[in-house]
Image (tube, rainbow, N blue to C red):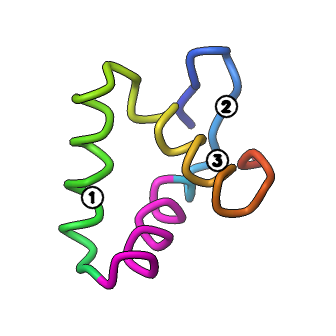
Amino acid sequence: MSDTADGRALPPHAITSATSILMERYDCSEDDATEVLVDWALRTGIGLTDVVAWLIKDATGAAPTV
């Protein structure tokens, strides 16, 4: 499991979930969705786990749970 900046643990499937959300929203491939996640993390200076947590919360209204 990975931890977010505030110490919350992300479940192992969180990155897969975030990738799937992007694939559905933007009709893109898994590789493209992964690149978007990494790009967002690099551009914002926010860790990848925090970007993943934000995206899941934005899509579902709830933080990812373990």
- Disc nearest the viewer among 1 and 2: 1
Amino acid carrying label 2: it is Ala
Q: Say which quadrant the N terminus sits in.
A: top right
| Residue 17 location (% of width, % of height) | 54, 65
Q: Residue at x 64, y 62 (%)?
A: 59
Is-magenta flag for residue 16?
yes
Q: Residue at x 25, y 43 (%)?
A: 38
Q: For this view, does 22 lie left or right of residue 1?
A: left
| Residue 56 location (% of width, % of height) | 62, 54
Q: Residue at x 52, y 31 (%)?
A: 50
Residue furthest out toward the top: 6
Mark 1: few, some, or many residues within 10 Å (few <14, many ≥20)? some
- Disc nearest the viewer among 3 and 1: 1
42 is higher (above) or lower (below) than 16 = above
Amino acid carrying label 3: it is Pro
Q: Which mark is residue 11?
A: 3
37 is higher (above) or lower (below) than 7 = below
User: Taken as a whole, is the magenta stretch helix, strand or loop?
Assistant: helix
Q: Residue at x 26, y 80 (%)?
A: 28
Mark 3: few, some, or many residues within 10 Å (few <14, many ≥20)? some
Q: For this view, does 32 lie left or right of residue 41?
A: left
Amino acid carrying label 1: it is Thr
CA separation, marks 1 and 2? 20 Å
Q: Which residues are magenta?
A: 15-27
Q: For this view, does 7 lie left or right of residue 28?
A: right
Q: Which residue is mark 1?
A: 34
Q: Which residue is mark 2?
A: 9
